[in-house]
Amino acid sequence: MSKLNMAYKYDLNKYRNLSTDSDEYEEAKREITIKRKNIDKGSTIKIVLLAIVAMILLFCVIYGKVQISDMYSQINNQKSYLSSEQSENARLKAELESYTSLKNIENYAEKILGLEKLDKAQIMYVDIQNDDVVFIPENDDNVFVKIKNFFNSIIEYIVD
């Protein structure tokens, strides 16, 4: 872009129908000339470098947006995979519970193992003591333990 500096000098006397000298007219004519400023080659290089820097920044911003979009799509893919795995887990738990139901266990025990349910005639009732105290009988010690206890009691008697 070039700037044009224009310098004009108006002679207002010619509009008043006054006579002017030719020297003044020539001088005014010289001042009316358009002055051009020369284009600096350094400014062109600066403009080109600024344009390149702007393009690089624009590329970086677009590249960053693409990377963010890619990350969001990966997150969404992982979320959908997680939800499908959770539904598969729920299905497998329900299947496991159906295999371990009481009715299936009874059928397995009767058909495969040959077990039968108890009849009332097979049940035996045992009466236990009504007291809250339980008596535990002493263990019968063997001969060697009795000898050891005898010697221990003699030693305690002597020492005391």
Image (cartoon, rainbow, N blue to C red):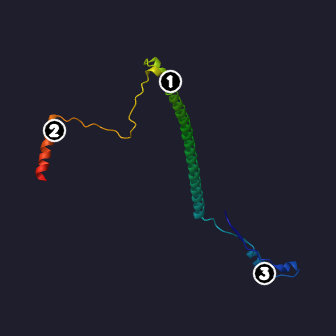
**Circles 1 and 2: CB distance less than 8 Å?**
no
Label of residue 24 in the image: 3
Image position, residue 109 (x, y; %): 45, 21
Which-is-in-front pick, marks 3 and 2?
2
In the displayed orientation, state which residue is furthest to the left: 158
Image position, residue 70 (x, y; %): 56, 44
Image position, residue 88 (x, y; %): 54, 32
In the displayed orientation, state which residue is furthest to the front: 130
Front-lying residue, 148 or 64: 148
87, above or below 64, in the image: above
C-alpha separation, residue under disc 3 versus residue under disc 2: 153 Å
Q: Label 2's element?
A: helix
Earlier residue among tags 1 and 2 = 1
Q: Residue 1: which quarter of the image?
A: bottom right
36, above or below 143, in the image: below
Residue on which the image places disc 1: 104
Earlier residue among tags 3 and 2 = 3
Image position, residue 23 (x, y; %): 78, 81
Earlier residue among tags 1 and 3 = 3
Note whether residue 146 is visible: yes
Kind of residue at badge 2: Lys
Residue on which the image places disc 2: 146
Residue displayed at 60% across by 60% down: 47
